[in-house]
Amino acid sequence: MTPLQRYLAPELLRRLSTLTVSARTVAAGSTIGVHRAPVRGSSIEFRQHRFYTPGDEPRRIDWRVYARTDRPYVREYEQETNLRCLILLDASGSMAYGSGGESKLLYARRAAAALAYVMLSQTEAVGLATFGGTTQFLPPHGGQAQLSRVLDALDHTVGAGGGESGGGGGGPGLLSAACVAAANRLTRRTLVIVISDLLIEPEPLSRGLARLRHDLHEVAVLRVSHRDELTFPFSRWCRFVGAEGEGVRVVEPAVARRDYLARFEQHRERLRTVFKPLSVRHHEAVTDSDLGDEISRFIISRGVPSPVRASGGGGRGAS
Amino acid sequence: MFLSPIMLAFVGAAVIPLVLHLLSRSRQTELRWGAMMFLDEASPRRSRVRSIRRYVVLALRCLAIVALAAAMARPVSGTGGALRPPGRAAVAVIVDTSGSTGAPTGPGAVRLDAIRESASGALARLDEGDVAALVTGDPALPPVFTPDRAALLARLAVVQPRGVGLDLSAALGRAADLLAAQSTSSRTIVVVTDRQASTYVGIDAEFARRFTLRLGQAGVTRLLFLPSGDTDRDNVSVREIEVLNPPVLRGQPARVRVTLRNDGTTPRPRFAVTVRCPGQPDTVVPVDLAPDSEGSAVFPMTFAEAGRAVVSAEIAPTGPAFDDRLSRVLDVVEATRVLVVGTAGPASLALSPLSAAGRPGDTISATVAPGGPRGPLPRFDLDRNAVVLIPHLQSLGEEDLRVLRQFVFGGGGLVVGVGPLTSDEALSRLAEMLPASVGRAVEAGGAPMRVELTNSSHAIAGSVANAADVFPGASVVRYRALSGAAAGSVVLRLPPLTPLLVEGRFGRGTVLLGATPLEGPWNDLARSVGYVPMLQAAVRYAAGPSPDAVNLKVGDVLSVALPPGAEPSSAALVSPAGLALQLRLEQTPGGPRLVHGPLAQAGLYELRYRLQVQDPVRAGVVEPAYVRPPPGESDLRADDELIGRTAKLLGAEIIPTGSPLSANALRHGSELWGIFIVLAVGFLVAEVVLARYWRP
């Protein structure tokens, strides 16, 4: 079994491959939007021809090739098409919840692998940063060798407390700190994809996200939750031990369920209020849902990157 | 008190919720949980409320189990609510042995068999140490409380249908009294009857009210009705034997009517009834009987001897046997002999009606003695007469007075009227025998005055049609003032308070004194239609008391006056079953009387005693007395609705025919398990509601 197959089953790989067209469309559109201003009027190294797809600007059609082949091809240049992406993976103690295939951390690692596979297949540059457990930083690079490096880094990602389902580490400002650390290390505009359960206070998180947005990075958040966290289905008395050192609470679920669910929804609303002014797109996935579907929805939900501050590069922003 | 206290062990199950609660707390599922931020960091107050809620819910669960266990233990009321094991039970079983229980229900079977079976079933529910008594109404089987069930069943086996009805109210009262003397915690009355409606007719709301109080005083905790047997009502009974022309005189034809009743629904054409009388041939007459109706036949009979004769009517067996034969004791009497002492001879105004009254076949035989200044009485044998009637006393000689005095003192009757011809000498000689002093003549207020009766219940009153006008159409214009009469001795009066006829006793005899001549003048009483009946009634009254009633009904007291010369110590009363019954001697103003009763059994009784006479044949006397069964007992009609209403009135529980008694049916009062079931359900509902909706 190859490292890739450890995370992505052949069926999922097949689905991700079919996702490529739409992903490319989105990616291409994004890339164009992002890079249009910086590359205008400058000589850029030609990389390849690509078949014209709806959304491409007609002026970029290579008419010579069109005359020869009677088919529309656009010219692609190395810098304008190479989207830089950093996957920021939360390996804190709370991500350890769940057993076997329903572990949030495992699901997050598979999601990261899938995203890396999709984007590297589109000749994007992908990097990986993990925090909370094993702290790693793999700068964005393109090429299939980068996929192997990403997968290798994921293999070495261990949750806080050790093991795939371990826990114990983390804290309220960990994700924010990770965002800041990533911003410090990213030199060009990058799409930062945060994969986390977001079981933290929204306000500290906003500071880290704001720093990324300040540096003109685009941020997308994939929230990974366990079904138990959404429905609180417990019936017997439970002794909840904080996965990140919050202590112990003995709870009668029948009594606590209503308040729990209300607070969960309230927290979700607070996250929205944090994401919205920062133009952070986010998507929620549940560990018992199909990963392929969730990745597709995530990519689509990102949509066209919203305009960011036109400072630095001008226009709609580019890395 | 609980009927099944063993089930109280399930109260211990109330700890199950507690244990589960503790176990659930100790066996908590431990989870490493990331979303701790959403779990409540409860405030102390909220924690306290939650804790209270937890314990309230827990308590409700425990209470539900306790209530359920209590319901299974079958709590009962009427024990002061004490939680103690059931004590000894006392049960009075009223067994219906009335005549209707002899109705056949099949070959060789009668209703009493079903009653025995139901009563046996009730006795089978007795536990060890319990006592029971059978209340049968049979004097031979007095109720005795015993724990010996075999003895009770043996007594039950020997009870037989009796020709009497079941006086349910009396039986209930007796059972309550019997139970009141029992020192037990549980007292139950079980009424085992057939389904005859007449048994329950006498129970009304007033009786129920009093009886309920009585039950409470007696501590009776439960009353059960066990109506048993079928509803077949086919029955023909001899309902009545009566003399159409009383009294029955020796040698005179008497008309005896026998009435039959068909209580069933089957028409009985030409249903034969046989009349029997000792010394006379049996007579059979067919009677047509429609359903639920009566029919009768008249039998002419003549009795050659004076005394008591027993006439019986008998029909073919239908329904119970007790009413297939009915008897009646007839008093065959001689005519009352009266010696009329007058002054005007046979044509006297007073003598004419009396002579007419004394014609053959009538009850009075009159002989006229023409009175005179020297007195005629010594020439007559007064002992041959019962009464001396002097309509208008004039004079009375010494010899007359002596003879008359002996006659009345020995038991003879004297009816005498005073008027204008009455001499003071005669009055003074007769004064000691008269019930009042005779004074001067008085005008009756100038207007004709009517005569009225002072006491409508007086024996003479039976002959009077109108107590306020004893002699219709007649009046009294003058009278002799009567004074010194004892209170209550005035029989007739002139309004408002003038005595007209006064009674009194002299020796063993009766004296009736009229304030006006019985024949006139001063009045025209003899012209009234009420004159002859009144005079005849006065003569019969003066002749002495009528024979003791010997046709009785169940429940009556037999009271017989012994004739002169009878030996009270030799008297004995023999029951229809041939048993010698105890008699008690009571001294009364009229002489010694033998008393027995109340009579509990229908049938022909015999009173036997000896007379102190030389002739051994005359020495032994046997007087029959007949006690008839209650007529309503022949009506076998069943009425379950009436039984239900009666049970409701008395607060009794009906155990339907064929339904077995529950194991503890005889033990206690009203069961409360239903209430505890409701409580348990209520606790459970409250628990569910609190657990679901109370979220502090």
Image: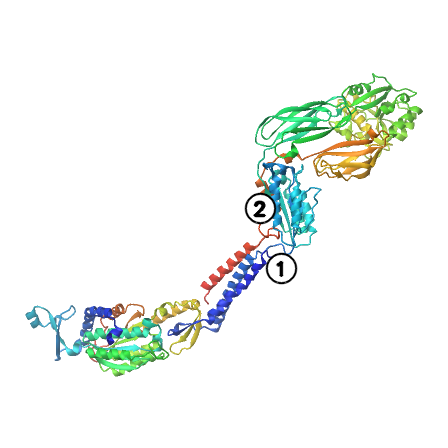
Which of the 4 image quadrants contains residue B394?
A: top right
**Can residue B320 be seen by looking at this rendering?**
yes
Q: Nearer the viewer, residue B303 or B339?
A: B303
Q: Residue visible at 45% across and 66% down? A: B695
Quadrant, the C terminus of chain A: bottom left
Q: Nearer the viewer, residue B139 or A107?
A: B139
Relative to residue B170, is residue B56 drawn left or right?
left
Residue A311 visible in the snapshot = no
Q: Are marks 1 and 2 on the same chain?
A: yes
Picture residue at 40% right of the left edge, 69% below the top: A260
Q: Earlier in the sequence, mark 1 or mark 2?
A: 1
Q: Is residue A193 left or right of residue B443?
A: left
What residue do we see at 14% from left, 71% from top? A57
- Secondary structure beneath dot 1 equals loop
Query: Which quadrant is the N terminus of chain A positioned in?
Result: bottom left
Mark 1 residue type: Arg
Q: In the image, residue B441 lies at what x, y percent?
A: 86, 26
**How far, Cα to Cα, is label 1 from label 2?**
27 Å
Q: Tell me the chain of label 1.
A: B
Q: Is residue B139 above or below residue B473?
A: below
Left of A280 or right of it: where is B478?
A: right
Instruction: Measuring from the top left, give residue B588's x and y in whole percent.
Output: 82, 37
Write down the quadrant of residue A224 in the picture. bottom left
Q: Position of residue B688 (x, y in %)?
A: 47, 61
Circle 2 — which element?
loop
> Residue B221 placed where, x, y %?
63, 51
The residue that disc 2 covers is B655
The crowd level at tag 1 (other Cα within 10 Å; few <14, some 14-19, many 20+) is few
The residue that label 1 is drawn on is B84
